Each structure stands twice: as C-alpha cells, then as structure tokens.
Amino acid sequence: MTATPVRPTEQKYEVKDLSLAPLGRQRIEWAGREMPVLRQIQERFAKETPLKGIRLVACCHITTETAHLAIALKSGGADAVLIASNPLSTQDDVAASLVADYGIPVFAQRGEDSETYLRHVQIALDHRPNIIVDDGCDVVATMVQERQAQLAELIGTTEETTTGIVRLRAMFKAGVLTFPAVNVNDADTKHFFDNRYGTGQSTLDGIIRATNILLAGKTIVVAGYGWCGKGTALRARGMGGNVIVTEIDPVRAIEAVMDGFRVVPMSEAAVHGDIFITVTGNKHVIRGEHFESMKDGAIVCNSGHFDIEIDLKALGAQATEVKDVRNFTQEYRLKNGKSVVVLGEGRLINLAAAEGHPSAVMDMSFANQALACEYLVTNKGKLEPGIHSIPVEADKEIARLKLQAMGIAIDSLTPEQIEYANSWTSGT
Amino acid sequence: MTATPVRPTEQKYEVKDLSLAPLGRQRIEWAGREMPVLRQIQERFAKETPLKGIRLVACCHITTETAHLAIALKSGGADAVLIASNPLSTQDDVAASLVADYGIPVFAQRGEDSETYLRHVQIALDHRPNIIVDDGCDVVATMVQERQAQLAELIGTTEETTTGIVRLRAMFKAGVLTFPAVNVNDADTKHFFDNRYGTGQSTLDGIIRATNILLAGKTIVVAGYGWCGKGTALRARGMGGNVIVTEIDPVRAIEAVMDGFRVVPMSEAAVHGDIFITVTGNKHVIRGEHFESMKDGAIVCNSGHFDIEIDLKALGAQATEVKDVRNFTQEYRLKNGKSVVVLGEGRLINLAAAEGHPSAVMDMSFANQALACEYLVTNKGKLEPGIHSIPVEADKEIARLKLQAMGIAIDSLTPEQIEYANSWTSGT
Amino acid sequence: MTATPVRPTEQKYEVKDLSLAPLGRQRIEWAGREMPVLRQIQERFAKETPLKGIRLVACCHITTETAHLAIALKSGGADAVLIASNPLSTQDDVAASLVADYGIPVFAQRGEDSETYLRHVQIALDHRPNIIVDDGCDVVATMVQERQAQLAELIGTTEETTTGIVRLRAMFKAGVLTFPAVNVNDADTKHFFDNRYGTGQSTLDGIIRATNILLAGKTIVVAGYGWCGKGTALRARGMGGNVIVTEIDPVRAIEAVMDGFRVVPMSEAAVHGDIFITVTGNKHVIRGEHFESMKDGAIVCNSGHFDIEIDLKALGAQATEVKDVRNFTQEYRLKNGKSVVVLGEGRLINLAAAEGHPSAVMDMSFANQALACEYLVTNKGKLEPGIHSIPVEADKEIARLKLQAMGIAIDSLTPEQIEYANSWTSGT
Amino acid sequence: MTATPVRPTEQKYEVKDLSLAPLGRQRIEWAGREMPVLRQIQERFAKETPLKGIRLVACCHITTETAHLAIALKSGGADAVLIASNPLSTQDDVAASLVADYGIPVFAQRGEDSETYLRHVQIALDHRPNIIVDDGCDVVATMVQERQAQLAELIGTTEETTTGIVRLRAMFKAGVLTFPAVNVNDADTKHFFDNRYGTGQSTLDGIIRATNILLAGKTIVVAGYGWCGKGTALRARGMGGNVIVTEIDPVRAIEAVMDGFRVVPMSEAAVHGDIFITVTGNKHVIRGEHFESMKDGAIVCNSGHFDIEIDLKALGAQATEVKDVRNFTQEYRLKNGKSVVVLGEGRLINLAAAEGHPSAVMDMSFANQALACEYLVTNKGKLEPGIHSIPVEADKEIARLKLQAMGIAIDSLTPEQIEYANSWTSGT
C-alpha cells in the first residue's frame, strides 16, 4: 500500500499493490472480449481524439470494464483521473494495472474507509475537471457545495445511476444545477441492459458466491420494481425462486402483479421471505420492524447504489451478537432469539461479493458514457443547464454495433414500408 | 338484420339481430366483473356528468368491454354513437344489447364489408362529434380529409392504438392536426397491460381456437418486438414455443436477444417457422418471397391493428387453390406444392377467432379512454393542437383503483424516505 | 337424433345428427396434419392387418383425434365399436363423420345423460370385445362385474388415464384382474406429452373459452402435481399467473416448491385463489369447507378424468341460487353472500369448453394405443394377467417417428461411445 | 502438505494444510443450516448407532456438505475413511477440519494428480470396508478387479451418480457384481433435486465464476437432456440464454423440443453455440470435428461426472497455443485462427470453479446415502446381489422432513379419499 497519499500532480495514484498489475491486465484483456462496442469507439477515439485537452474525472466502480472506459477516454485525448465510487467494489488488481500498464492515475483501494473516499473526492476535484463522469452524483454534489469557483471550468457531467439522476433532479429543482448533465441512464441501451440484465445476473451471482445457497424453492423478496428490480425478480424466478415484490408506485406494482409476482407490503413480505434484496434507490426500505418479524436465518442484501436501503444501524441495535459466518456474510443474533444474515455489509452485493456487472452489459453502458463525454465536448456552450438525454441516434448506433459484433442480422424497412410509416391517409 | 340503414337522427342503429340482446347482456354483465376500475369511473360520471351535452363518436371493436366504456360515457352525459373499427371483431349480441338494453346507437355487424364500414364512418361523422374516441385513426383521418367544416366543433380526439398514433404523428408533421389528440396508448396502464398482457394472451387464444394446434415444440415467429410483440413472444414461450423474433429497430432487436429469443431477418425466419404472428404496425412484413420459402403447412396470422401486415394479395397470386379448412382458417396451395395456412384473413386474430382482449386489461385501457374524454372537455380551449399524454396522475389513479379492487396493498413512502428522495446533499 | 337406439347388430350407431358429417370430416382431416405418427402406423396397419378378426370396443372422448385412432384400428382389421367416455366431450360432427364417412359404429352424443352412457356401455359389451381400449376403466369394470361369461373372449385391455390405472391396480389387488391390461399411460411418449403438454395447454384453453378471463396477475391454484398438474402449473405460470400448488404426496410437494411454486394446504389456498383447477384423480379435493372461505367470484374447474374432484353436491347445498352466466359457466350464490363460479359442471374443462388435447399430443398417445392393441394380439396367451407396460422399443419408435415428421435430426452414439457405455473398467 | 503419505492404521490423513481447519469448520457450520434432514438423521444415528462396528469408505467430492454426511456416518458408529472422488473438487479447508475438528481420516488434496488419486483408492481399500459409499464407481470397480479376496467382507455399496449406475449395470451384465448395490440416484429425492436443481444452479455458478460472462443473449448448448441436462437447460433459459439441446435418445429429444428448446445434432449446434455444457455421462461428446466449426471464442465446459465428455486430447492436437486467461479458464488457439476457451480442464465445472451443489440439495442426496448405508447393514445377508432401489418410504420420509424444516404444510387424504383411491367399482 502507498504510505502517504499525495496530490495527482505529485504522485499519480493510490492503489493497494502495484504487483497485482499482471493479474489485473489479464482480467482486463479477458473482459475486452465481451466489449466490442466500446472497443470500436476506443479505436475511433484514438484516431479522432475528440477529448483532446480535456481534464476528466471518473468516479466509478473500479472493475475490468471500467478499465476499458478509462482506456477509451484516454485514447480520446482526455487527461483522466479515476476514483472509486464504492469502498467495496474496487478490484485492486485492475487499479494496479491501470496505473502500471496503462498510465492512468487511479485512487482506489478495496475496503477504503469513508474518510479515504472523501479524500479521494477532494483529490479528484483538485484535478479541476472539465468533465465529470459520475456514479451516484457524489463528486458533482461535492463540487457544487464546496468548489463553486471551479464550476466555470466544468463543461458538464454524465451520470449513469438512477440514484444519481434522482439527486440531479433534486439539484435542478433547487436551482443549483448550473451546467449540463447527461443522463446516461436514460439511454435504452443503458437501462434496459445494465440495470435489468446486468443487475439481474450479478445480484444473484453475488448472493450465491456469498452464501452458496440454493435459490430454487426459496421465497425471494425483491424490494423495488424499477429496471433493476425487474431484472432481479426475473432472474430470481429463472433460478426457481418464488418471488415477492414490494413497491410504492401503483403502476409498477400492478405491472409486477401482471408479471405473475406476489405483491405485498414489506411488513407482510418480511414474514415470508428467505432472501431479501433491496433495489429501490431509497433509504431504510428494510428497517427495525421488518427484521423483528423475519424468519430465523433470513438473508438480507442490497443491490441499490447506496448502502442505506437496509437500516443496519437499527439491526445492530436489535442484535446481541454479530459474527462473520462466511466471507461477506455476517450473522446478527437478535434479542428475539432469531438471527438475520446480512451480506456485503449492505453494499451493492454484486460488487461486494462478485465481480459486478458482466462485461457485455457494461460494454453498452460505457459506450454511452464515452459518447456522452464526446457529446458534451462537441456541444460545449450549446447545451442548456439541466439534464439532457443521450441523442437517440447514439443509442441506436450502440445497439447496431452490438448486434453486428454478435453476428446478428436484422431486417430493414422496404421503401414501401418507409412510405407507409410516413403516411396517414391509408387506413383500413 | 335491419333492411335499409338510415342516419342516426332517423333510426339509431344498424345491428345484426336485436333478438341477440339477452345473450349480449349476459356477456356484458360477466365482463363487468373484471372491470372494477371503469365501474368506479362510471359511477362517478353518473354523479358528476362531466360529458353533459357532448356529442361523441366512438369507433371501437364492439365487444363486451367496449360496452362498458360506452355505458360509462353515456353515464357521463355524452350523446354517444358507436361504430365498429374492424369488420371481423364485432360481437353481434353485444351490439344488439347496447341498442336494446342500454339505448346506445350502434352501427356494426360482424363481417360487414369495406363499403359498409366506410358508410358507418360517414354516419358517425354526420353525428357532428365534439369528441372522437378513435381506434386506428380512420374516423379522424376521414374528418380531416372530407369534413373540414366540422373541425370547428371538434374539441379533440383520443386514440389508443400504436398504429393510430403513428398516423397522428404523420398528420402532425404534415400540419393537418389542428386539434388536440390524447395518446391513450402512452399511458403506462394502457400499453404495459393492454398491448402486452392483453395482446399476448388473446393472440394465442385466437390461434388456438382457430387451429386447436399444440404450441409446445412449435417454432413461433413473432414479427415486431414493441409492447404487443413482447407480450406475444413472452406468452408463446410460456406455452412451450421456441420463439424467433424479427425486428427493424436495433435497440428492440438487442432487447429481444437479451430476453433469450433468437433474432434473425424474416427471410431466415421464414424457413424455420411453424407459426408466424405479425405485430409491427407496418405493411407487408410477410410477403411473397417469404411465403415461397416457408415449410409446408406453415400457419400465418396477424395481431397488428390493420390487415396489411401479411401480403395476402401476393399470396393469392402465388396460390393455385384456396380452401376453408376450419373456421377462420384458409389453406393456400402454392405452385411450389407446399401450402400456407392463413388465419382470420389476416385481420386481428384475437378478435377474429377469439373474443379480443380479456376484460381485465380493457378495464384499464378504457378507464384511460374515459378519463381522456373528461380531460379534453375539462381543458377545452386550453390544449395546444398536437398529441398529448394522459396526465401521469390519471395513470397512477387507475393503477391504484385496480390494485385496490384486487385486494392488493402496497407500501407508501415514510416521511424519512420522502425527505431522502427530495434531497441531493446526502450521498455515500 | 336417432329415435330408438338399437343394438349394434341391428343399427350401427347412435349419434346426434348425421348431417354434421361434412364439418366433422373437415375437422378430422385438419387434425390429421398434426398426427404423422399415427398416420404412419395406420398405413402399416392397412398393409399388415394385425388386428384382423378382432372385435374391439373403444371407450374414448369422441374427438377428431380419436377418429384417427379408430380409423387406424379399423385399417388394421379390427371390427371396432366406439362409445363416449364422457358426456360432455363428444364432438357430434366427428361422431357423425365416423359413421357416415368411415363406416365406424359410434354411440355418443354430446350432453348424454348417465343412463344413456350406461346403456352405451352395455351396447359396447354386447359387441363381445376381444380387446377393450378403455379410458377411465368403466367398460372393463362393468365387464368384470356384470359379464363374467364374456371374459373368456377377452384378450386384454388398454388404459391410458392415470385414473383408470389406479382402478386397475385396485382390481389387481382385489384379485379380479384375470387378463392382461396394458398401461398406455406408462409410456414416456404418452404421459410426458399428453398429460403434461396436452393437459397444460387445453386446460387453460378451456378456462379462457369459458370465461375470457385474463390469466396474468391471477392467483391460480392447481390441486395435484402429477404429470397433469405439472403441465397445468407450468402453463398457468407461462400465462402470467401466480400459481399455488396443493399436494398430498411429500415428494411431489417438494418438487413443486423447488419449481418455484407456493405449496400450501387447500384450506389456505382456498383463501388466496382466483381460479382453482383440480387434477388429482381423487374425489372431493375441493369441498364445502373450501367454498366457504373462497373470495367472491372465485372460479372453480376440473381437469381430472372424473367429475368428482369438486364436491358440487356440497356446493349446491350451500347455494341459494344457481344461474348460467356464460356458456359452460354457472354461478353459485352462497349463503355467505359471496359467489363461486363453476365451469363445465366440474367435468374435464378442456373437453367441455374447448376441443380437448391438441392433435399433436394425441398423435403419440394414440400411437401407443394402436401399438398396445397390436401387442396384445401378437402376444395373445403369452402375457400374465395383470398390468403391463408398453415395450420401451415402441416408446422410442414413436418418439423417433415424431422427430422425423418434425424434421428434427438428433445425434447417435459413435462406436467409441457405445463401447464406453457398455464398459465398467475405465473410470477417472 | 504431509510429506510421506502412510496407511490409515499409521497416519490417518493426507490433507493440504491442517491450519485451514478453522475456516473449514466455519463453512461446514454454515452449510449445516441448509441441511436439516441430514441433521435429524445424524441425531437419530447418534442415539441408535446403526452402523456400529462397520468399516466404511466414502469416495466423494470433499465439500462442506460431504462433511455432514461423514459426521452422520461417524455418529452412527461407522469407522469411516474419506477419499476424494475428483482431483479438482476437494475443498482443502473442509478436509482439514474433518481431520482436526471431527477426527475423521481424509485423504484428499485439491489438484492431486491421477497417481495420487489411485494411491488413495488403494489406501481406502486397505481399510477393508464393509460398506463403500461410491461416487462414479471407481472404488468398487477397483475392488472387484484387484481385491477379490476382500469381497467377502463387503456388505454392499451405495452409488449416487448416473455415471456410476451405468458402470454397475455393465458389471451386473458382466456377472461381476456379486454383492448388493443401492442405487441412491434412483431416489426421487435424489435425482429430482440434486441432478436437476443442484446441477442446474451450480453449473451456471461455475461458469459465471470462471468467466464473469453475461448469460443473457448467449446461445447455450446443453449436451444431454437427462435430469442434469434438464436442470442445466432450465436454468440457462432462466438466466436469459437461448438454449440448444443435443441428445441421442429420441424420447428425451422430443421432450426437449416440447419444452421449447431447439434440438439439433452437435455438428450443427457447434456452429451456433457461444457456451457448451456437456452432461451426458458418455465420452467425447464434443470432439475434433466440433471444435473446428465453433465460433471464435466459444466456451466449452463439462458438468458430467468424468472429465472425458470433451475430447481435450483432440483439442490439444488442433491447437497451436494454450494459455491461461483467467482462473480455471484456458484458451486454445486453433490452427484455423479461432480460439476455444475451456473451463476447469473439462472437469465438473461446478466443483472446479464454484462450490459444488448447494447444501440444500445435498441435504436430501446425502440423507439418502445415510439411509442407504443403514438399509444395507439392517438387511445384511438378505439382499440379492445386484442393484437395489432405496425403499420408497425412505424417499417420502426425506421429503416430509424437508418440507417440515421449510415450514411447509401439505394436505393429507381424507378417509373418504383413501377409500376412493382403493376402490375400483365406482366410476363415472
């Protein structure tokens, strides 16, 4: 571990152990196989350098996939600095390889404490970014609160989590969003795939690695039926689970019902569940009253962005004993004699206990990120302050590149069909 | 059958046989059990009469569910006239009961020819509607083309099909949409449910009634992966089919791939399919070249709004013989020695061979229609010309009423959660 | 309708209306497309006439598929007489065509009463059968009880229902099964397909035709998790239902749990269910105490062989009023103010309200029946009294013919693999 | 590592590192939570000691679940010795804990070579077992071939793999099976659950841990549609894969077709697959000709018992280079320029790259093993040489204990139903 962390200008990284670089590089290369879209963008960026001269900060989960985004941004000419968006998600070998093999400054260590994280945010802001690629909106929110003077240098920001978008909307409402923010999450090729298929698979992967439990026959409670919740519920059923969904939005709730899931309030779900997964973007979705009524040995984890969905403080207060029972797995013995098992300390379970989203989904999400950065630079000065969508053509282009890389051909409209689609006079 | 059809002012209906009314009434009442949302709206309308004095034309599939919409509109004070939107979908007993039991003028007969249909559109326009509830945009398009003078009396129109919305958009682009149109299809409680779950179940129902074929083990080609296509593909798989999807949009195509379906161009799908279902909203999706390469005995049908998705003219030209082999089922013997079986003459198979969408989905779709009519009247003079969405609160209200009627409780946000959702400063 | 029914020697049929024959023939021919296996057997039978001189009685559901079995048996040389195994399942047009077009004596009318049914059993026995193809074991049981003298002429019997096998086992235990019975249900190509995929699809088809109800979002209770129950539960989930299974066998119950279904006793399921389907083979699976606790408007139907699974007598006693609300749909208004809706009078719903199993599954079931008859005749005098399985080679042959007809090729073992499969010395 | 391995009488173990025992114990205890059935049997065994004085050898995957079986057998009084059935499946911490914490001799190290394995088999036979709990039939086959003299002391053997049963059948046919063997695999509570749900989940788990690949949208080829293949195909679809099945048995092939899977020969599947999984129990299912036609980067792995299903020797001969690309993941660069990726060296991927079957399924499998050992001892001298099934009552008892532990109640037959089930006279 580096002893005294320093500013980027002085020493360009703070990672666990540079000797892990070869393993990291091997894994980064492996991930690249499943990321043909980002690769094609990286190749174009290398030729066109659309980000030349841009100081960029990316606050992300430091994984093999993020490595490819960082490489693409650097290929595009950006002077990029990476920090970890989550203390438990950093893959130390990847961080090492980015520094050692690709010359990209990274400030991230698995298991770093909150203080270190906040220090990294400050290091990132010291880089005086023109572009911030944010993940949960922490860097942007800190800049707005603490570095007003730097806002003049900021061209814009991109955000890919639902959670971050909610915060940006609140900022816009509060009148403090004085620059353009691109909602990468809004791209179909992002939220349809990353949130649904990525979260779906990797959440179960995290649970299985943490517990080696059989999902078939278990009652699995999914809190939240947004895209992440849909994906998680779908895959939980695909593994033989009996899924209960909880929601606060009536439209989503009726959708879950029609999809064949049982929908009940959490107070009732708490009694039936064997495994609980929160993916709501809100806080304390599972709280004291719920722990109290759970079955002995119930397993609780989170796959939402922040670690606040499960009220662990309340659980701690209800517990007489907390002990490690497996990696990433802690058992809280309650006063009522039953135990509750918490995975990954309530942090994103797919990143805590598994490897995060598979490369194939991050390929599209990060292709959106890369194109969003290019879009901000290309349209510098032209975009209103506020939240912008990715242009729909970028979205379609990403899907097209992906299909092509998978060897899948699709139909195109015939001239007759194009004409029909544009006419309104011909009917029955 | 009525001998000489007359204008509404003279004789208020043109239905097959009024003596079918008792059967129609029984079936209308049965459908009502599954339509609790519309019933609650109808009860409020009866009290508040928000449509008092409004001349209204509804061009719909004349089914038991439509009957409840018509009754609700009448309860709200509207002077409503109904015509059939599709020659094969009219349920003659329902038409009879609406006239005889509920005093609502209906002009519709199952199997009516195009000429009759067009005459009914004229009858409807003679009613000088203030509101048009349209289904595929035929009445509106005719009014714009042939009854410019009446446009001054038109408050607005509602449209619930994807097909109709495409036409309205083309009209808007062409500068001829000079009044507000409410896109009922845009409501989540409409397209999530009606297009997906309604079309999904009823399309297979139509195919099974027409053919009594086992779906398990069949290769089923679904053309189009919009909401209707998604629902159809999902249910086809749910019945044990091996589903192939064809698409022209790359984002939808990659979504179908990730959902586990095989995606290929129609030229390739044509070779593998046992059953073909079109739900694209476009024309000639299956055409001459495709028929030519199909397996002997391949079954072809449509669940898109208009009967143009399958190029039956081309098929007729390729055939040496056409014969009825079952109700709604015709076999075309091709010159190449193989046969192609067409269901319901290429018209909406769920309405041709079955009973259309189940009441439970139409409950929400028609609740949206009723609220859209009220919205147009309440906001008379305030809405810009062009296409408007249903207010999101109406959408949520419908979902809420539906859940309540199903006895399903959901969570609501705690004060702490509401505060969190509105803040942006608290992060990791 | 024939006025005075007479014995086969005098007049060879008793059907509803011979003028329905053309429609029946068209439908029989349509079914034939999906029955390539039975067709190939029929063609061989026509050449080899293995049943020459055999007097045969078949007690079956008189459907288009049964028609092909009857034709195959006749082609094989059998002197066959058909009676209906179920009062509600007879397709009168098919019965007419079998008599008029194919010269096969049929005694069956849709809706015939119990007395008529029992009279038909007697007519069948008057035929002095050498082979009985039974369906539920009624003909065989009657022969054993009332026609001991004829047993000497009986070569054997075939039985294809689970229900009938249970009765044959009880007869064997009681020492009265003095002849060989072939358990057609035991063939993999029978129970895997007919009971599971056939019952699964056609049961839902029957419910939808009877009610036009949306299955998505409904809580569907399936009583029994044998092959029929598995198929029904699978398809109910495939249509978006939330499925509850009830069982009495712990192994089946745990299998249902692992398949992701909720398993509870009927007393609890009764409270939650929107739709109830019995497929147990036992009686009074849903009874007074259950009706009492059901939701208002709960729908109850049966897909097991006999109409005894639902205790309609008890329900009648609890009701203050019974009225028809749709075809095959009766509403019982209970004293507790709620109503229970019964479909098809508790008889097999797929045959009462729909068309029974699709041809493609009956193709294999009836191929087994035909080969079972041939097997009994070929092995006359060699088979012990008791219950025999279909030879496994017949089973494989049927599967092979089916795959071939579907154009599906599979692998075969290499010489190396055959050797490996037969050796035991080579291990890790 | 122990330096010079010695005979059990001298030194009672050969494990990697005894200091791993605490971690092993923690994991063994965690697994115990999901094994309530085996726990109840262990508690009874501790009281009744039915295996008192029995020398027992168990050749198993040395996992946390096996630990509980070993503990139960020891509790029952057995003098048990454990050896690993597979070089890649041993969990060294578990082996250490069994020795250190539970006093059970274990001879197993992860990654041991064939020579060591064969030496361990000899050590096991030196123990002069009365009972052999075998897994793939290696110990039994070796005894029959090399230790004829010891057969007199052998009461019998139990076998739980399909592969082992095939070998036992071949031995029986060859006349060398002169003692009773209990087919544990035959128990419904074994093969329904372990082979299907266990293999299904853990195979995908192994693939994901080895590759972190997204399964959604991938074409996944499952070779073999026995219970293991069914489970694997089901879960692969549940994760969004598009599944192709290959088979050599026509009945299983048509079942796969009806389950909605594409069925083709391996020669065709080879062209389409992204991921290949063999679960056939036979050898060289994927061989030279198949590798040649695969897509670049195709992933190949095995979940059948032995590592012979993929012809790695042929692949090696076709390759110009082999390199490690991730843990348990090797890339073969072929002469045709494409690469093939092999996971876990072709050994059981769920044990090589993941943790084997989840405890909940092994609970039932090993409960069967324990009861099978008791059955052999209790019936010593009474069982014919040959292959015996587990008594059906043991099967039901295991299911009953499992349901009870899961808190699931089921129905029981009423007296009226019992009477009905036993009668044969009452019919329609």
Image (cartoon, coloured by chain):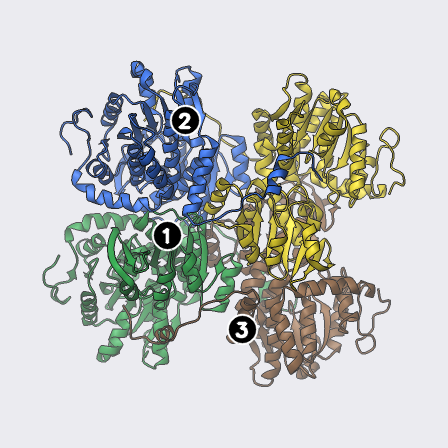
Chain colours: A green, B brown, C yellow, D blue
Q: CA distance from mark 1 to mark 3?
A: 34 Å
| Residue nearest the observer in this picture, B312 or C415 | C415
- In the rendering, which numbered label is found on residue D182? 2
Q: Residues within 10 Å of mark 3 (few under 14, many from 20)?
A: some
Residue D264 at x, y percent in the picture: 50, 36
Tell me the SS state at disc 1: helix
> Label 1 sits on what residue type?
Leu
Q: Which residue is mark 1?
A: A204
Residues marked 2 and 1, same chain:
no
Tell me the SS state at disc 3: helix
Q: Which residue is mark 3?
A: B397
| Residue nearest the observer in this picture, C226 or D162 | C226
Tell me if residue B50 can be seen: no
| Residue nearest the observer in this picture, C312 or D134 | C312
The residue positioned 33% from the left and 25% from the top of the image is D132
> Label 2 sits on what residue type?
Val
Q: Is residue B265 above or below residue D56?
A: below
Chain label for disc 1 = A
Q: Is residue B6 above or below residue C139?
A: below
Residue D100 at x, y percent in the picture: 19, 37
The quadrant of the picture occupied by the C terminus of chain B is bottom left
The quadrant of the picture occupied by the N terminus of chain B is bottom right
Tell me if residue C10 can be seen: yes
Tell me the SS state at disc 2: strand
Residues marked 2 and 3, same chain:
no
Residue C412 at x, y percent in the picture: 49, 27
Q: Residues within 10 Å of mark 2 (few under 14, many from 20)?
A: many
Q: CA distance from mark 2 to mark 3?
A: 63 Å
Chain label for disc 3 = B
| Residue nearest the observer in this picture, B313 or C251 | C251
The residue positioned 63% from the left and 64% from the top of the image is B34
